Image (cartoon, rainbow, N blue to C red):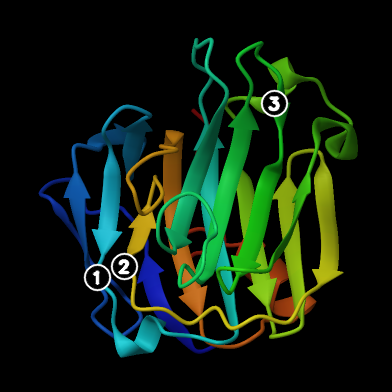
């Protein structure tokens, strides 16, 4: 499958998360908390000041890619509308000239408590951008049913089509749209926030993987049936 980043995020202590892809794209933890559930360790992000930075490398400078991550969103109280990003490789939170890149967002929570734009994957050359996402209506659920469940979010870009595929307790969903942009950049990969360290995530990110090729549906299905390299589901909290 040609991974260039595989972060199980299961070290359990310290401020370094280790890449298992063989490319040594290790990350540094800022404030996120280690928690243990059954036999697994996880990083919990509190939406305030938690994130992980993986420095840019040539192996992460991709024209085409597949990004996958396990997320476990946790509800929170706020009157501010907010994106909660899983991982991104771009500059800032808006698209502008010379700000090419990509972002995989976990969800959007409005100040009224509504939830939207689940598993949103967007690519851009800084001028033109395109992306896809899912709604509660797509999943057939209410906002209260969304929280505290595991979701496997996948973003795929082949140079002309951007696609998102979401594996959830409510079914598997896929959307795509067409756009041709050059997403290459020299920015770091940020997990749990955007590159300006805003739009921070609330919940648990169980694993992040980046591949330098376009995974097939069969390959994505296989990854969704696994957790941290084992044929099992994430633990129930």
Quadrant holding the N terminus:
bottom right
Residue 144 screen position, x and y as percent: 70, 16
Determine which residue is flagged by label 2.
188
Residue found 84% across the figure and 37% down from its top: 139
153 relative to 176 in the view: left or right: left
Residue 164 screen position, x and y as percent: 73, 61
Circle number at residue 115: 3
Q: Quick check: marks 1 and 2 in contact, CB under 8 Å? A: yes
Q: Residues within 10 Å of mark 2 (few under 14, many from 20)?
A: some
Q: Residues within 10 Å of mark 1 (few under 14, many from 20)?
A: some
User: Sequence order check: which comes first, mark 1 or mark 2?
Assistant: 1
Residue found 62% across the figure and 53% down from its top: 152
Q: CA distance from mark 3 to mark 2?
A: 28 Å
Task: Examine the image and state in which quarter residue 116 appears.
Answer: top right
51 relative to 164 in the view: left or right: left
The image shows residue 211, relative to residue 177, as above or below, that is below
43 relative to 18 in the view: left or right: right
Determine which residue is flagged by label 1.
55
The image shows residue 78, relative to residue 214, as above or below, that is above
């Amino acid at each position: 499958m040609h991974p260039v980043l595989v972060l199980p995020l299961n070290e359990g202590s310290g401020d370094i998360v280790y890449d298992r892809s063989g490319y040594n794209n290790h990350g540094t933890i800022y404030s996120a908390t280690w928690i243990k559930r059954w036999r697994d360790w996880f990083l919990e992000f509190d939406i305030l000041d938690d994130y992980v930075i993986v420095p840019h490398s040539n192996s992460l400078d991709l024209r085409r890619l597949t990004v996958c991550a396990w997320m476990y969103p946790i509800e929170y109280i706020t009157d501010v509308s907010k994106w909660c990003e899983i991982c991104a490789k771009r500059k800032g939170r808006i698209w502008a000239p010379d700000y090419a890149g990509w972002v995989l967002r976990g969800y959007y929570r409005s100040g009224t408590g509504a939830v939207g734009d689940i598993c949103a994957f967007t690519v851009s050359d800084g001028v033109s951008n395109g992306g896809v996402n899912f709604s509660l209506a797509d999943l057939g659920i209410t906002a209260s049913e969304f929280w505290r469940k595991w979701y496997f979010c996948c973003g795929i870009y082949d140079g002309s089509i951007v696609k998102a595929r979401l594996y959830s307790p409510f079914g598997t969903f896929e959307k795509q749209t067409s756009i041709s942009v050059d997403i290459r950049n020299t920015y770091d990969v940020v997990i749990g926030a955007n590159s300006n360290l805003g739009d921070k995530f609330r919940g648990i990110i169980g694993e992040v993987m980046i591949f330098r090729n376009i995974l097939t549906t069969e390959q994505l299905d296989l990854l969704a049936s696994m957790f941290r390299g084992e044929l099992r589901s994430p633990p129930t909290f």
